[in-house]
Image (spheres, grey):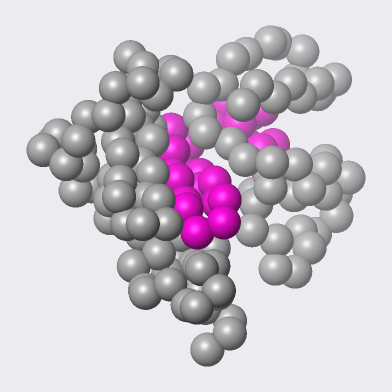
Amino acid sequence: MPLIIHDPEQPVAQVVSDPVALLDIGPTVMDYADLPPLDGSLGRSLRPQMDWARAPDRAVPTFLHQSAAVRKGKYRFIRYSDGSTQLFDLSKDWWQTRDLGPDHPAYAQMQAAHAACCLEYGFDVTAPLPETGEPQNMDDD
């Protein structure tokens, strides 16, 4: 998603293509206000990117009902509620029209990154779905 940050102390314009999330807005604002991050905030400040730091391999999740997707580097891995998966190379297929499939060399690595990232956000996507059809929140155990 496009995001523009104006930092008057950093007058040199730059384009950062690292994955970011809407969850990063709060921690970024807090950082610029010289305030500590909120307890339990899952996002991270984007201020280091303004100082030329990079995080191209950061895994950024998207959740929708029982499905979850992760963007990491140039790939996006999606696991749907029925357990089916898709892998896309966003550098060649931004609109995600060509599933690379489980035989692609990056599939296993992205599948593992997906599971780890989702678990970090409190969802075990490998666990059986509860009766409600919603992902299991790890805090409910």
- Residue visible at 81% across and 21% down? 6
User: Which residues are the magenta region?
Assistant: 45-71
In the rendered image, which quarter is residue 94 located in?
top left
Residue 25 in view = yes
Answer left or right for 40 relative to 38. Answer: left
Tell me the quarter of the picture where residue 73 sits: top left
Q: Position of residue 32 (x, y in %)?
A: 83, 41
Single out the residue that lies furthest toward the right.
33
| Placement of 6 over or under 140, stated as above or below | above
Image quadrant assignment for residue 96: top left
Q: Residue furthest bottom?
A: 141
- The location of residue 26, given as percent across then percent down, is 78, 48
Give me the residue at 58% from left, 81% from top: 139
Of residues 60 and 134, the one drawn nearer to the viewer in this rendering: 134
56 in magenta = yes
**Res. 122 visible in picture:** no
For the N terminus, give its image quadrant. top right
Q: Say which of 69 and 72 sits in front.
A: 69
